[in-house]
Image (spheres, rainbow, N blue to C red):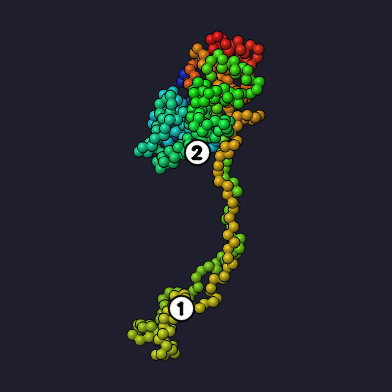
Amino acid sequence: MSTAQYTLASAAGEKLQDGSADVEVAAGALVLAPSGESVLRIPFGSIAAVSEPEPFTVRITLAGGDVIELSRLGVMRTQLLAELRDGRGDDAAAAAGAVGEAEVFSAEVVSSDAGAGAGPGPAEVRVYDDALLVTAAAGTERIGFSFVRAVDTRDYVITVEVAGRAPLILTRLGRRTAELADLLALRLREARGRTATFLGSLLPGLDPMALHAAAGLLRDGAAVPSGALDGIHPDLAGTLLRLATLPDRRDAVGGLARRAELAIGFRQLVSVRRPAVGATPWRDRAATPHIGEHESPGGSFRPGLAGMLAAGVMSGGPAAFGSGSGFGFGFGEGYGAFGAYWGFRALGAGMNARATRPMAPRSDVTRGLLTPATEDLRALAVAGDSPTVLAFALGQGPGQVVYEVLNLPEPVTCVFPGELAAVNRALDDAGFRAEALTPTVRIPHDADWADRIAAVLGG
């Protein structure tokens, strides 16, 4: 928590409040506690933009247009900006249904789609199992890997080509440019591999080449028209519908398919990435520590000039005391060979038992076993009480698109305005949470469902 001066203004620029307040980020919200006023709690989802219009001033623009300006934060300004960035990123990931744990990068958005929320400027780039999330001052945009056509790296600039929109261009990544490019390539390859494995388990009898072609179309979150699927193998679309649809929903989906050509899709709901397990730190279990006893054996002479002179005298070497003759101290002329011995002893060599390092037993080198990180592809399932893959269908009507969940007990069928490809992209960006897109019509699964669907589809 920190103290700041705040100004609260309306969307029209009218000042509503100002003064001193305690500011903190807690429990998924920005909390502003003015002196003598009620506490203002702003969820991250209600924050439209965060910027610094002038030095040491933080401006927070709310979704409704109201503005909060904070100043005199001191050294806590950087921490507040970081907490708001991380909190908004986590909230956006949850809203978009991002799968897995994020790898985070700091970058500059040079160019992006005109209708996307991030916009040019400094941004936080998060790479998940299924998507790329870019959070900038103006907002957050999600790019699903299923709609990424290519990733190009040149001169420390990463260009992400995306179907149906302008490319995303990132720069100012520094030495992490290659790291981000390699990670994107890896995640794209892994996502396509999961699709192929899932379809292989769902359609074990399908020819390998047909399976390869189907996996290329049925990318995670992308709806494929039934005609395109039947072009790969006769009745492939009908087989997928039978396998993926709840038993009590099959008649209704069959009626929907007779009124419009359905596009069928699958979307992974949870991460199947499993962390490494079984690692234990290495420990030498046999050798006991000998702290302070590992120094090399010392010589018998004192260090410094006095020791050097004493060693010279004992070795009988020349110039012991500035004279040309040596002093052997009783060794005499026949003991000149001992001079080398005393010289080595002066340097710390020789038989010096009291300074010898004690012997240690041979180490028992025992290391822990490690199961590396992997993906549990067997966990990808479209059936059961808690499927890990969402099965859905889209039907195109005159200016409207019907969205039907196949393998979950959804209470209603949602209808959205627009064309099928655009609605598919919007659903993917929203994590296939239909309520986030405010459908124009909700049709309950009751006795009138067939008649109302016929009205939407034009007969």
Classify the position of the N terminus by image quarter.
Answer: top right
* Residue under numbered circle 1: 345
Q: What kind of element bears circle 1?
A: helix
Image location (x, y in percent) of residue 83: 52, 35
State which tag comes first along the sequence, 1 or 2: 2
**Residue at x 51% of width, y 35% of height:** 193
Q: Is residue 289 above or below residue 281?
A: below
**Residue at x 61% of width, y 12% of height:** 450
User: Which mark, by number, is residue 194?
Assistant: none
Image location (x, y in percent) of residue 424: 50, 22
The answer for how far apart the CA atoms under marks 1 and 2 are is 60 Å
Q: Amino acid at mark 2?
A: Glu
Q: Give yes or no for contact between labels 1 and 2 (Cβ–Cβ under 8 Å).
A: no
Image location (x, y in percent) of residue 99: 55, 33
Which of these two is toward me, 74 or 150? 150
| Residue 69 visible in the current orientation | no
Classify the position of the C terminus by image quarter.
Answer: top right
Depth check, mark 1 against mark 2: the one in front is 2
* Residue under numbered circle 2: 103
**Residue at x 56% of width, y 65% of height:** 291
